[in-house]
Amino acid sequence: MVRFFRSGNLASRVFDRQLLSPRPGATVNTVRQFYENLVPSYTIYDIDCPDYSFRKFTDDGKYLVAFSRNHQDLIVYRPIWLTYSCTEECDSHDLPPKAKKFDSFFKQLYSIPLASSNEYICKDFFLYMDCHQFGLFATSTAQSNDSTATEGAIHGVPSIEKITFYLVRLEDGVILDEKAFCNDFINLAHSIGAYLYEDLLCIVSLRYQTIHILQIRDSGNLVDVRRIGAFCREDDELFLHSHVQAGFGGSFLPGIKQRLLSYIFRKTWNEVPDQTLRVQHLKKKFYFHFQDYVDLIIWKVQFLDRHHLFIKFGSVDGGVSRSTDQNLAFFAVYNMETTDIVSLYQNSSEELYSLFEQFYDHFHANPQDSSHGKFISSHSNDIHALDQLHTLKNKASSSSQFVKKMMASLPYTCQSQSPSPYFDLSLFRYDEKLISAIDRHRHCTEHPIKFISVRSPNVVKFKIKPGSDSGASDSRAKRISSFLFHPFFPLALSIQQTYMQPTVVNIHFRR
């Protein structure tokens, strides 16, 4: 009977579902196996659609978020399923012209202005709260690299005159609250500078080296909870001013930097039990590198739970550059309640890599993830993903460089992976250089991207081809593509962008 169930016949699977119950805790995984039969089987090429920048589906599948080309307006759609009628057998006919329009698949709910004349919506930034259907968006003015030095600002970090975060109720487009940062720099690309965990929001100011913790109330208000940077406790500033002499002209290290140095000092101190050798060890391991530790800045932060932050420290150059694989970096686990650093790892640490390999899901776990988001494939929950990781590790010429490359993905970027079952590595194989669950643009290929059955390695379940149906294009032009998969429908958008040419949007769905 088990072999009959795994035969791949959809009718037999539905029949078998009536007879057998899955093992406890395996219901969702069993249901997801039906997607081997329910795949996108039809493509509408270069569909007639509005000239918008489509961002992503929400993880609950209720909304498709898009922005206007001038980056001023927010447009939200609700996915609807294509319906049409034929006088004869529908499968023998092509789709009617009316069905080949974008409006046949998506219903526009509203379009609202979000940015002012001198501000622009950051098209890469979007975070979503399933429980309240709130969306968090960001706008900013142009970046300035010639900003004047101000007190507390890090030299070498650019400045943005104004960055505004908007909390929007996606059901009706009402702007519930906003939070502005002036003459600051927050990395908005791919939502790197912010992290959402339950109702807590973390925003990292690179320019002023401050971690802002906010709470999103049920009413839709953004409430300041604490700031971690120059001071770690709420009364640190008051205590400092009341105990420092009036004539003191020196400066103090920021509170978070003091915690970092204290941890490194104690760790180095305890490494050598002998008192005589301990002093020499401190000189070599701590004081010799003291200025390097002082010059470290916060790059990126994420929540591990409601009380612990996972903080990445590195050089100023690495904090504002796109490629940070080879830069020296440190990872710290920080307890917000005790204001202590619990542990510290270098980005070449084998111990941290071991934790990364075995417990990767803990780095992006969120109790409020949708039921679909909890089943994203990773090497800590899927044997096929683990095999891929081990293959990459065995091919690497240098173990330390491989570890650094893997650690470059930490801290985890919030909501950066699609929960679509078609990216489930226990069901489908595909070329991850061309397409993956990670939300990133890819270089376009002339050939369709194949999704191959894991159970039957010689069976291509479906193909996704971005661009035009004819395939005729200028091979010299740089073409990039992005893919938006619905979290549970057999529905996907492929978007191809070519320099100085119109954007081509294809819709892939099950007919």
Image: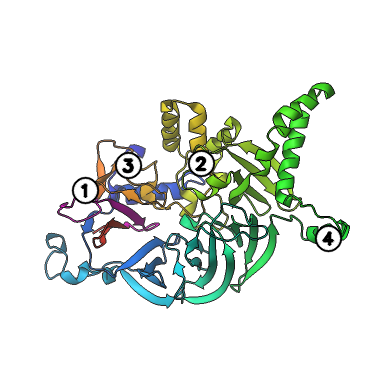
Q: Rounded to the nearest whole Å, what is the CA distance between mark 1 and mark 4? A: 63 Å
Note whether residue 21 is visible.
no
Identify residue for label 2: 408
Find numbered disc 3 in the image and state the secondary structure of the residue it sits on.
loop
Identify residue for label 4: 241
Q: Amino acid at mark 1?
A: Arg
Crowd around label 4: few <14 · some 14–19 · many ≥20 (10 Å): few
Q: Residue at x 74, y 54 (%)?
A: 232
How far across and how far down the image is residue 357, in percent? 53, 36
Screen quadrant of the N terminus: top left
Q: Compared to 398, does 309 lie above or below?
A: below
Find numbered disc 1 in the image and state the secondary structure of the residue it sits on.
loop
* Marked residue nearer the N-terminal end (1 or 3): 3
Identify residue for label 1: 476
Question: In the rendered image, which quarter is residue 349 located in?
Answer: top right
Identify residue for label 3: 430
Crowd around label 1: few <14 · some 14–19 · many ≥20 (10 Å): few
Crowd around label 2: few <14 · some 14–19 · many ≥20 (10 Å): some
Left-right relation of 294 to 456: right
Most common SS among magenta residues: loop
Depth check: give the residue in front, 470 or 475.
Answer: 475
Screen quadrant of the C terminus: bottom left
Note whether residue 275 is visible.
yes
* Marked residue nearer the N-terminal end (4 or 2): 4
Whether pointer 1 and pointer 4 mark residues with C-beta atoms closer than 8 Å, the reply is: no
Question: In the rendered image, which quarter is residue 185 located in?
Answer: bottom right
**Magenta span of residues:** 465-491
Q: Residue at x 33, y 51 (%)?
A: 14
